[in-house]
Amino acid sequence: MAGKTTKRTGTSINFVYSYLSLTVFAFLAATIIPVSSEAALAATLSLGGSAIPALIFATTGNCAGVAFNYWLGWKGEEKLLHKLLQKKSIDRAYRITQRWGNWSLLLSWLPIIGDPITILAGVLRINFTLFAAVTFALRFLRYFVIIAIL
């Protein structure tokens, strides 16, 4: 079979780009940038993506995004907090985080207030191991449920 070539269809390359795009969208959706990772997940699956890799890539991107938020909060501290508190959703997230402390992380998966809670967790120096365990598990569960529904 020497000299025989195979034709490349590009399908596997499209899946790679689809999963990478899903990861990027999931990362951005975890920040305060208004992007829908759920829509990207649905698109990936509708284009023929498999559920397990989609779950892994979406979860990985979103977990990296919340870790980035935590880092921003940790590094930005009070200066960042003061600037962000001018927004109503951040103010509400701040009150929740101040009142409930570590328990507020259970709300971090919610739209609007969830992303600010992950930033505030860094500002308030919530233990990162606890932060990661709770927020990463919630991200996984959210995407698992979405995939099960789709």
Image: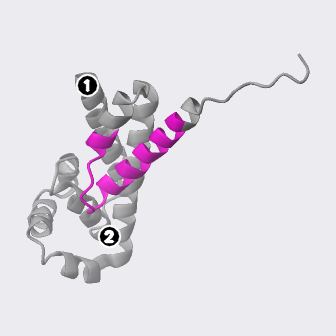
- Any part of residue 129 in sight: no
Residue 143 image point, x, y percent: 30, 35
Amino acid type shown at disc 2: Gly
The quarter of the displayed image where residue 93 is located: bottom left
Q: Residues within 10 Å of mark 2 (few under 14, many from 20)?
A: many
Residue receiving disc 1: 150
The boundaries of the magenta stretch are 14-40
The quarter of the displayed image where residue 115 is located: bottom left
Marks 1/2: CA distance?
Answer: 34 Å
Q: Is residue 124 above or below residue 58?
A: below
Q: Nearer the viewer, mark 1 or mark 2?
A: 1
Horizontal relation, residue 149 to residue 89: left or right: right
Residue receiving disc 2: 73
Residue sitting at x 29%, y 70%? 123
Does the magenta stretch mainly form a helix, a strand or a loop? helix
Q: Residues within 10 Å of mark 1 (few under 14, many from 20)?
A: few
Comparing 67 with 88, the one in front is 88
Residue sitting at x 30%, y 34%? 42
Residue 38 image point, x, y percent: 27, 41
Horizontal relation, residue 45 to residue 39: left or right: right
Q: Secondary structure at mark 1?
A: loop
What quarter of the picture does the C terminus occupy?
Answer: top left
Q: Is residue 26 magenta?
A: yes
Mark drawn on residue 108: none
Say whether marks 1 and 2 touch (CB < 8 Å).
no
Q: Is residue 123 magenta?
A: no
Amino acid type shown at disc 1: Leu
Q: Earlier in the sequence, mark 1 or mark 2?
A: 2
- Any part of residue 101 in sight: yes
